[in-house]
Image (tube, grey):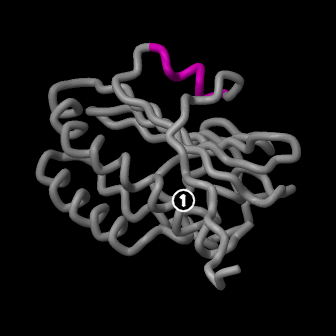
Amino acid sequence: MSGAPAARPPILAVPVPRDSEIAAHLAGSDFHDCYQMPIAPTGRTALELYLEVVARTPGWVNRLMALRNSVVGLFGLKNLGHLNGATARRPASEYKLGDRVGIFSILYLSDDEVILGDTDKHLKVRVSVRKLGVPRSAIAVATVVHIHNLLGRVYMLFVAPVHKRIVPAVLARYRAGDAG
């Protein structure tokens, strides 16, 4: 036996779960992705998991968000703040539909899935955290984007490739904290 720690299962790019609420937003989308990661079976709600995950956002992601906010301000788009801007303001149980949670508002809320989103003149973005399996031993994080105009298309040319690195990095950071 070597003293090396056991390898953790990878964070996988997977299809959006068909039985999720976010799947209803796929029609006509211009971009979507989904990443799945095993977690220890949990009774925590999807919103609790979301809050725990974004609380561990890597610093480089927040620096990219700050850069994004500076650049898009020149085009009259929203300054969203940082991904982990929602951390520890109040317990998950106090949030309800329509409440702002960091950079997003809650659009759908159940124990097993939360959909958060934002709509601007250039994009409509929806993000889902969905608990999977029996017992609830995995989470899937799906993002669905509908582009509204040319500015949105240009924006997504830069954001889409980076997004495919950000979500796995945020999930990996969460997993590294042994928050399961």
Relative depth, front residue between 148 and 96:
148
11 vs 6: above or below: above
Q: Residue at x 25, y 59 (%)?
A: 69
Q: Which residue is drawn at 49% across and 66% down?
A: 84
Q: Which residue is drawn at 26% across and 33% down?
A: 122
Among the 4 quarters of the image, the one containing residue 149: top left
Q: Residues within 10 Å of mark 1 (few under 14, many from 20)?
A: many
In percent of width and height, residue 156 lies at 25, 37
Relative depth, front residue between 42 and 148:
42
Among the 4 quarters of the image, the one containing residue 128: top right
Q: Is residue 60 left or right of residue 131?
A: left
Q: Is residue 85 left or right of residue 131?
A: left
Q: How many labels sit on residues?
A: 1
168 vs 148: above or below: below
Is any part of residue 99 visible from this angle?
Answer: yes
Residue type highlighted by circle 1: Leu
Assign the N terminus to one quadrant of the image: bottom right
Q: Is residue 92 left or right of residue 79?
A: right
1 vs 158: above or below: below
Residue at the front extreme of this rendering? 1
Q: Residue at x 41, y 14 (%)?
A: 28
- Mark 1 = which residue? 171
Q: What stretch is highlighted in magenta?
A: 21-27
Overall secondary structure of the magenta section: helix
In percent of width and height, residue 56 lies at 54, 71
